[in-house]
Image (tube, helix red, strand yellow):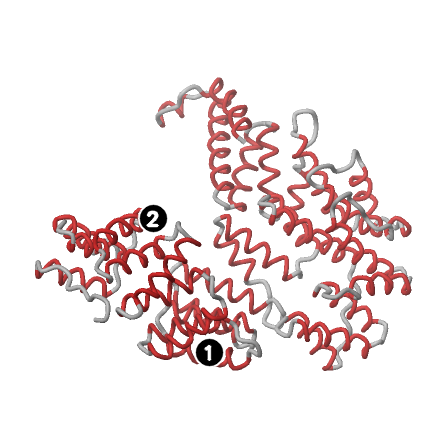
Amino acid sequence: MRLALLAFAAPLVLLGGCATSSRDDAAAPPAAAAADSAYGMFLAGNAALSEGRSGEAARFLDLARAESGGDPAVAERAFQAALMAGEIGKAAALAPDGPAASEPGKRLGRLAKVVDALSRGRGKVAKEELAADGIGFPHRSAAALLGPWVAAAAGDTEGAVVRPQVRGDGGVDYFGQIGQAHLFERYRRYDEAETNFKALTGVARPSEIAVIAHGAFLERRGRRAEAQALYDEALQRNPANLSLKSARARLASGKPAPAMPTVKEGAAFALLAPAAAMISAKQEQVGLAYLRLALHLDPTRNDAWLMLGDVLQEGGDVEGARAAYARPKAVAAEFPAAQAKLAWSYHNDGDKEGAIRLARAGAETGDREARLTLSDLLRANERYEEAIGLLDGLIAETKTPDWTLHYARGQALERSGRWKEAETDLSLALKLRPDEPELLNYLGYAWIDRGERLEEALAMVEKAVAANPRSGAIVDSLGWAHYRLGNYKKAVEVLEEAVELEAGDPEINNHLGDAYWMVGRKDEAGFQWRRVLTLDPDDKIKTDAEKKLASGLGPQPKLAGQ
């Protein structure tokens, strides 16, 4: 993008000179004023795009494109912004072309034009666009998976049932087989459709996607008992899966089978696997483009909305992410996960009550992960007893002990002052997961801070530091262990390292101040305690630092056994 920016900036400098005041602007020739305006819009659009504000970027860059007289670099950037914002019709109209356009831009532009034509019911146009010059790297997989659905839209029955292939891409093989099964069904070639579905679900651990697709096919064929057996077998392996539970509940209620996917719905599904692959490969912008294209074809795909929300959240577009997470309705299988993601978004923005309200809505569905999210938010807001109650229920329902649940309840019990119960949970969690650094640190630090089992706790936090040496909190635990054992010189050395790793942590700075005091570095100790008061400490740490500063007596250490 830096090259495009420089290419665009150069003619503007030549045309616009150096406009530094409103008087100069008024006196500037019209062409120079227009160029200056276009350049400003271009910069604003680039800034918005880099910060994840795709909609705003699309507006600025489209204005810059118009003002610049169609500068190819600006037009291509406007295309990218429109695509990222989900304005697929506009993106298709702006698709880069001609000798000045970049080859990656032209390939993605052709893909956008294919999807736009498909969405408008212009299958033959989509097929011609897909075939023209081919759509190469990195979009081969997406184009291959779209191909059969485009052929179906164009009326090419034989082309529609050819399974797509891209050498070395197992995702295309797998999702191409699902698509081929749906298309066989579309053309009433039911035996061939079933052969594909059985190949997909006849393995040891078939995917949820394959099970649901096969089950829906069986339901449509009136073979409800077989569909039920398929769902039940999958639920035995994954009893908490909401999509499977939803399919099984629909079947039990006697509701009609899901409709066979339309061409647009099938094409949208075909884009999800390449989108996930791109996101996994850290090619988030390409993954985002595919998700926007998929949702343009099928705006009811809740799984795509959740994926889109995650990409936007990661890219800094919080409002866009929230809008995506808000799309699944309360009856959708994805609703609990969407509410959980929304809840954390609001919690991270400081709206704690709003976050808990959203998490409750998800938890009321009974979903395990949604209830866990609510318990996490309750603990984060120091509502420990309510969190413990939720975790009690989750633990009681779990057939095989889950270390994460016992760890979470152990934390809540410890924070609420119920140490002996907490110790039991934390010890069980550690027995189930003996090498987990977080667990080793949490239980080890709890013993250290209480002056209990210090040698054992020291060994635990040493093991945790070896596993995660860049964690300031874990290194702090090691330093505090040496402090409680009376090894003050070693404590200073380790706690200084911890402060370097997490300079803004009030507890680590407080610990370092105590260690400085014990080795006679009292001025430095006072500096650390005063620093603690600037770091938004909790009430306990604040009171401790203020007491030491006011008394001038420093800390009163508890050694082993005290």
Q: Residues within 10 Å of mark 1 (few under 14, many from 20)?
A: some
Residue drawn at (87%, 63%) of the image: 195
Residue drawn at (28%, 60%) of the image: 481
As drawn, the residue found furthest toward the front would be 455
Residue 499 in picture, x, y percent from top left: 29, 50
Residue position for label 2: 501
Residue drawn at (78%, 70%) of the image: 215
Nearer the camera: disc 1 or disc 2:
2
For the question of whether residue 87 can be seen, the reply is no
Residue drawn at (15%, 61%) of the image: 555
> Is 436 drawn above or below residue 9 in the view shown?
below
What count of labels does the image hold?
2
Q: Quadrant of the N terminus?
A: top right
The secondary element bearing badge 1 is classed as helix
> Is 9 drawn above or below residue 301 in the view shown?
above
Q: Residues within 10 Å of mark 2 (few under 14, many from 20)?
A: some
* For marks 1 and 2 on the same chain, the one whose residue lies earlier in the sequence: 1
Horizontal arrangement in the rendering, residue 108 relative to residue 356 (left or right): right
For the question of whether residue 339 can be seen, the reply is yes
Q: Quadrant of the C terminus?
A: bottom left
Residue position for label 1: 390
Q: CA distance from mark 1 to mark 2?
A: 35 Å
Q: Amino acid at mark 1?
A: Leu
